[in-house]
Amino acid sequence: MKIVFFGTPEFSIPGLEILLEENYEIAAVVTAPDKPKGRGQQVIPSPVKHFAVEHNLPLLQPDNLRNEEFISGLKKIKPDLMVVVAFRILPPEVFTIPEKGAFNLHASLLPKYRGAAPINWAIINGETETGVTTFFLEEQVDTGNIIMQARCPIGENETAGELHDKLAKIGAGVVVYTVRMIEQGRAETSPQDESLTSRAPKLTKKTGKINWTAPARNVHNLIRGLSPIPAAYTFINDTMLKIYRSEVVDESTEKNPGTIIRADDELHVAAGKGVVKILELQKQGKKRMDAASFLRGVNIKEGHALLL
């Protein structure tokens, strides 16, 4: 079966890799154009492009998915199926080309967490379970009929980065199984239950600002839900601190939210209800480090306040 694969970030690679291992014909890989990144604005290829080049796979990098030349090129390939893993929204002119359709792998149990950041929002909202879903593409984003789902528990202190890697591996298995079912004509689908819909919008800088008046559990969920990228943050003495790891301490305090209540070898901060123990953080312009190393290099004492 001839497949065109669409993907851009690291999350896409396990799905593409397993299709190659299972000897499916990858007629083309479609990924984002190279973009300048960082202070030096060095042009860097996407992780999927890097993988495709390493494996000598035909590569397409359209700026515009509705470009006639791009669409004409896809039609000439005559793919049987399109597989989409972490890519832009495909227009109908593209996803209606294959005879067997096009499906997407989404990192949630749809219809929960439709949108750009399902892994992050599942953790931020304190979910204890998530998963992946394959579904046939339709015009409205993340709404197509479900082909397959696989569930995955979320650990109490698990970060978005850790869950991302776990779901990428689970998703790869779901992708190849979905392809196999479609190839054999045995793919059964079910409509999404719209009453269960929730959203996972794109993360913004505002999303990451810690509100210390919130309960400690909520603060902890925000920190791990945004770790390692883009990272939750707070300020002390007008200096930004990015927080990467934390725990909820089983104790109460009468100190005002945002007050540092321990700053010896550990860093504890009062929240609206409860206490947050900060394990890893990064001062603006410095390297990421554990709390003990951070405290040795700064003049922070009990009673100092983080900005709300």
Image: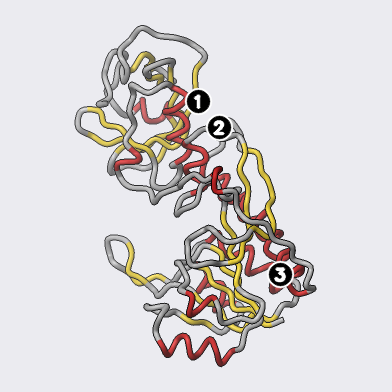
Q: Residue at x 48, y 73 (%)?
A: 31
User: Residue 185, position in %: x, y?
Assistant: 77, 72
Note whether 188 is above or below 128 in the view shown.
below
- 121, above or below 98, in the image: above
For label 1, the residue is 247
The residue mark sitting in front, 3 or 1, is: 3
Q: Is residue 226 above or below residue 80?
A: above
Residue type, numbered disc 3? Val
Q: Which mark is residue 179?
A: 3
Question: Dot 1 surroundings within 10 Å: few (below 14), some, or many (20 or more)?
Answer: many
Q: Which mark is residue 157?
A: 2
Q: How many angstroms separate mark 3 from mark 2 (CA)?
A: 34 Å
Instruction: Indicate the position of residue 110 as horizontal and vertical percent values.
Output: 58, 50
- Choose top left, top right, bottom left or bottom right for residue 23: bottom right
**In which quadrant will I find the C terminus?**
top left
Secondary structure at badge 1 equals strand
Picture coordinates of residue 99, whole percent (x, y): 65, 81
Q: Is residue 122 left or right of residue 43?
A: right
**Outermost residue, left side:** 238
Q: Gap in Å between the C-alphas at discs 3 and 1? A: 41 Å
Judging depth in this view, the residue of 117 and 71 nearest the camera is 71
Nearest to N terminus: mark 3 or mark 2? 2
Amino acid at pointer 2: Asn
Q: Are marks 3 and 1 in contact (CB under 8 Å)?
A: no
